[in-house]
């Protein structure tokens, strides 16, 4: 990709390609933090589309989500409604076989569907990235779709690369490249290298985001609300809060 070296922004030479970010997760429920991460990525990388993909079955969470897949799909639709380029994706819908959803396989399928002229990224929050080592064939994921990671709130810049390196699967290492800013969003750009094969891929971090919203805390807030009516959580879009109330979720 040809970039403006001052800001890292794409030039007209590469705007005929389509840029898509896969944003998977439980979305149990989808909240304002998810939207802020996606908005920042959309702006910084000039994304054509961010695919919000509720996951059917996460292998690392055998207990499953609190809300059903159908409810999480409907809440995600409401959360992203009216947001340019934000699209619901069923790429991680439950498998008919009952097999868990593996991010690597989902990304490979999406990449085949997009074609060679498009770029597919994998967008994730810091908490998801910190668990990357445990994912199915995790060392292959950065080479199928470059990672865009939203760093943890308050993380000192000097500790950023050490924390990222520690979370990478064995055999992968990071090499710092440069920093740039696009549409007010700061981006740290690295190269992730497979030490055994020499394979390399771009790797991006958005370190300036200060988003600390927990879906589990939202569920607990609703569950423990006092009185005869479920309290409206402040950290979700109002349409999502209305859906939670009307369907009696998380009580």
Image (spheres, grey):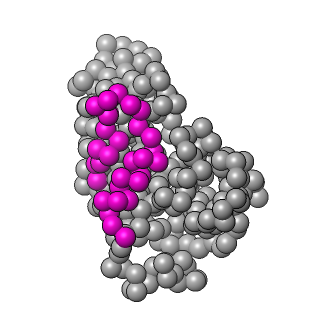
Magenta-span inclusion, residue 189: no
Q: Give percent across and percent down for residue 40.
A: 46, 60
Q: Residue placed at 35% from the left, 55% from the top?
A: 110
Residue 62, percent from left and from top:
47, 24
Q: Is residue 204 left or right of residue 84?
A: right
The C terminus - image quarter = top left
Q: Could you say which quadrant of the image residue 186 lies in?
A: bottom right
Q: Nearer the viewer, residue 50 or 29?
A: 50
Q: Whole-percent x and y of residue 235?
A: 42, 38
**Compared to 248, does 111 lie above or below?**
below
Between 43 and 194, the one lying in front of the other is 194
Residue closest to the far front? 197
Report the span colored magenta.
87-116
Q: Is residue 34 visible?
A: no
Name the outermost residue toward the bottom: 13
User: Is 120 or 236 nearer to us in this picture?
Assistant: 120
Which residue appears at 32% of the width and 46% of the height?
A: 91
Q: Residue at x 45, y 40 (%)?
A: 102
Q: Give how far across and how far down residue 1 sits, in percent.
A: 48, 78
In the rendered image, residue 110 lying in the magenta stretch gets the answer yes
Q: Residue at x 55, y 57 (%)?
A: 142
182 relative to 71 in the view: left or right = right
- Let me know if residue 219 appears in the view: yes
């Amino acid at each position: 990709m040809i970039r403006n070296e001052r800001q890292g922004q794409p030039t007209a030479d590469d705007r005929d390609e389509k840029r898509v970010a896969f944003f998977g997760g439980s979305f149990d429920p989808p909240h304002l933090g998810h939207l802020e991460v996606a908005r920042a990525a959309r702006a910084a990388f000039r994304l054509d589309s961010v695919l919000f993909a509720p996951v059917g079955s996460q292998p690392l969470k055998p207990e499953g989500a609190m809300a059903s897949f159908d409810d999480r799909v409907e809440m995600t639709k409401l959360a992203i409604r009216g947001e340019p380029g934000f699209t619901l994706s069923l790429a991680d819908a439950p498998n008919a076989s009952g097999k868990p959803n593996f991010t690597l396989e989902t990304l490979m399928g999406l990449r085949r569907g997009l074609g060679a002229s498009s770029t597919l990224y994998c967008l994730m929050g810091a908490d998801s990235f910190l668990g990357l080592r445990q994912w199915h064939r995790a060392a292959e994921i950065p080479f199928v779709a470059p990672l865009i990671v939203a760093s943890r709130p308050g993380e000192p810049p000097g500790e950023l690369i050490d924390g990222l390196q520690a979370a990478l699967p064995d055999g992968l290492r990071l090499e710092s490249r440069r920093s740039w800013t696009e549409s007010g969003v700061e981006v740290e750009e690295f190269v992730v290298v497979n030490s055994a094969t020499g394979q390399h891929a771009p790797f991006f971090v958005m370190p300036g985001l200060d988003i600390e919203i927990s879906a589990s805390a939202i569920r607990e807030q609703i569950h423990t609300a006092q009185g005869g009516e479920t309290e409206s959580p402040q950290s979700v879009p109002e349409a999502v809060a209305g859906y939670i109330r009307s369907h009696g979720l998380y009580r």
